[in-house]
Amino acid sequence: LDGDEWIANNSNGFANSDFDNEIGDEWTNVAGSWSILNQHLIQTETATSNLYATVDQTLADKYMYEFNFKMSPDATNQRIGLHYMSTNGQTENHGNGYFIYFRLSTSSSRVEFYRVENDVYSQDKCIDLPLDTNNWHNVKLIYDRTNGKSTIYYDDRYYGSYTDANFFTEGNIVALRNGGATASIDNFRIYHS
C-alpha cells in the first residue's frame, strides 16, 4: 500500500495501477494531458500521447497485461493502445518492442498489432472486433517470450494472436497511448508466470 493506492513491485515484473486517486510515481508523462477524473485515468488531448512505466519484463516466460478502457466519440479515427516489451520510454515509439492499437473509424473496428524496431513501427496484423464509444471494455494481452506470440482477449473473449518470427525477449517499458480520442483507462495490471 502506497498512500491510498495498492501498487505492485515493478522491478519484479508486476504492475497494479487502479488510478483511483493519483497516477502514481511509477508512471512518467512525456506527452499529453493525463489526469485522474472520477477515479479513472483520462487523456483529453486527441494527439498521440505517451505515459510510461518501467517494468522488468525479462523475469518470466509469459506476461499478461490487463486494463479497462473507454473511448469518447471525439473523432472519426480513434485509437487507444499499449506498448509492451519496449526498451525506451522517452522516444515516440519506445525503441524496440510491440504495441497494440484498438482502432475505431468510419470503416473499421479492430485491434492492430505492431512491431517496433529502432523506434520505427510496422503494422503486422489486424483482427476485427466490436468496438464502440462511451462503454468500458476489458483487455487481456498475453505475451510469450519463448516464441514471440501475442494473444488478445477482449471483453473476456479470445479474438486471436500474432506471432513475431524474430521476436524480442527483453523489455523494461510499458506505455499507454491514444490518438484521435479522449481515452479513459482503469485497473492496469501486469502479471507473469
Image (cartoon, helix red, strand yellow):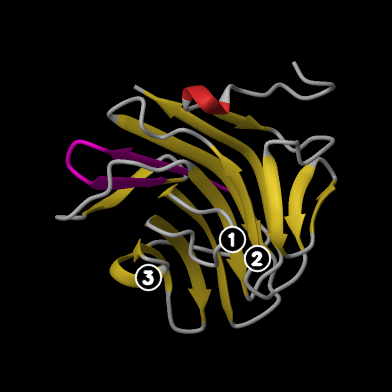
Labels 3, 1: front one: 3
Residue nearer the viewer, 142 or 166 = 166
Question: To which residue does mark 2 refer?
Answer: 49
Give the magenta-colored segment's residue range.
Answer: 137-153
Q: Secondary structure at mark 1?
A: strand
List x then y, in percent, for residue 30: 69, 59
Q: Amino acid at mark 2?
A: Ser
Q: Earlier in the sequence, mark 3 or mark 2?
A: 2
Where 119 falls versus 153 (above or below)? below
Q: Secondary structure at mark 3?
A: strand
Q: CA distance from mark 3 to mark 1?
A: 14 Å
Question: To which residue does mark 3 refer?
Answer: 121
Q: CA distance from mark 3 to mark 2?
A: 16 Å
Question: To which residue does mark 1 refer?
Answer: 177
Where 62 falls versus 108 (above or below)? above
Q: Amino acid at mark 3?
A: Tyr
Q: Is residue 175 magenta?
A: no
> Residue 40's quadrant in the figure?
top right
